[in-house]
Amino acid sequence: CRLENRTMGFTSLITNISKTGLFVQFGAYLEEGTRFNIHFEHLGFNMKIPVEVVHRHDHNGQMGYGLRFVFGAWREFLAVSMLVGLIKKGAPAPEKLKLVA
């Protein structure tokens, strides 16, 4: 995936996703409350959604950040919900495909 805002941009790896947010691996410090646009494609879904840094923590042995989706439109929530539903039904999970922008 790719995260960008007005002052920085970087690529990362999504290791967990839900209807309300996701976890990305990233070792450098990000301040809580910082907002980014996240860009990724998976299972035919081309996503560009605002996110906010919630906290930094370890997930399955990897340091990174919990990000909360900041939906600007109902269709963004619907697209994320559909993607998460497909993954829960057995579609390949993002961590297995190493999503890249």
Image (cartoon, rainbow, N blue to C red):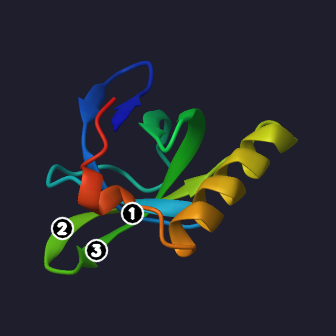
Residue sitting farthest toward the top: 6
Q: Which residue is mark 2?
A: 63
What's the amino acid at mark 3?
His
**First in sequence: mark 1 or mark 3?**
3
User: Label 3 neighbourhood size at 10 Å, few (<14), some (14-19), many (20+)?
Assistant: some
Residue at the outermost bottom position: 60
Q: Amino acid at mark 2?
A: Met
> Is residue 20 shown above or below 83?
below
The answer to whether residue 20 shows anywhere in this view is no
Q: CA distance from mark 2 to mark 3?
A: 6 Å
- Residues at discs 1 and 3 in contact (Cβ within 8 Å): no
Which residue appears at 45% of the width and 35% of the height?
41
Q: Quadrant of the N terminus?
A: top left
Could you tell me if the residues under marks 2 and 3 are in contact, i.e. CB atoms within 8 Å? yes
Question: Which is in the foreground here, disc 1 or disc 2?
Answer: 1
Whole-Å distance between the Cαs marked 1 and 2?
19 Å
| Nearer to me, 44 or 100 | 44
To which residue does mark 1 refer?
A: 93
| Number of other residues with Cα within 10 Å of mark 2, as a class: few under 14, some 14 to 19, many 20 or more | some
